[in-house]
Amino acid sequence: MARVRRFRGFRSAGLRAIPLTAPLILLGVLAGCTAPEDAADAGDVHRQSAGAPPLAVAGAARVDPAAGAERAAEPEDAPAAATVTMTDDNRFTPATVTIQRGGTVTWRNTSSVVHTVTGSGFNSGNLAPGATFQRTFTAAGRYPYWCIPHQKAGMTGTVVVK
């Protein structure tokens, strides 16, 4: 007759219990960090001269203290277009621009060195001095971007689409 052994826990089997709390928390955080399916198609890219997700917060609710009632968030007035310059001190100026949905950002290399405008789903390629790059953003959210050769020097920026 076969002898049946009862499981007496991890310690009696010579194993340590693995805490499941940390992996579950990590899984929950990562689940909230996924980009929408159309993140790669969130905008159109236009290159004007020769020269390479978003985290969306849409439909948030605001409380109107005067009325004491909750109402849907309304987009603040934002321009339809913005221009960002790339400088000799390896900076995007301004570092953050806000545009409305469907708006276009133009990056202009005013420096004497090659730069890039690279983000999730878009890449200008090398932009020689004097070159420009445009992208139209069709989905609301925050779009971080950077210059590949100068990212470690802090050449980063953000497009906020309302």
Image (tube, rainbow, N blue to C red):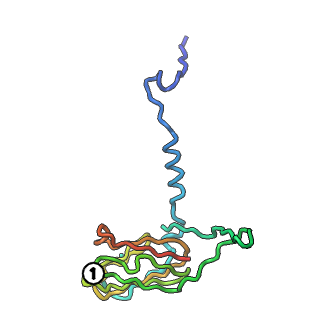
Residue 107 pos. (x, y %) = 39, 83
Horizontal side of residue 77 vs 112, given as left or right: right
Quadrant including the N terminus: top right
> Residue at left 58%, top 83%?
77
Which residue is drawn at the image coordinates 55% and 82% (left, top)?
A: 78
Secondary-structure class at tag 1: loop
How far across and how far down the image is residue 82, in percent? 46, 85
Looking at numbered disc 1 in the image, what kind of residue is underneath it? Asp
Residue farthest to the top? 1
| Residue farthest front in this picture | 66
Check disc 1 and report the residue beneath it.
88
Quarter of the image with the C terminus in it: bottom right
Dot 1 crowding, Cα within 10 Å, few <14, some 14–19, many 20+: some
Indicate the position of residue 12 as horizontal and vertical percent values: 47, 21
Residue 50 falls in image quadrant: bottom left
Q: 38 and 151: which one is in front?
A: 151
The residue at 49%/37% (across/down) is 19
* Residue 106 falls left or right of residue 72: left
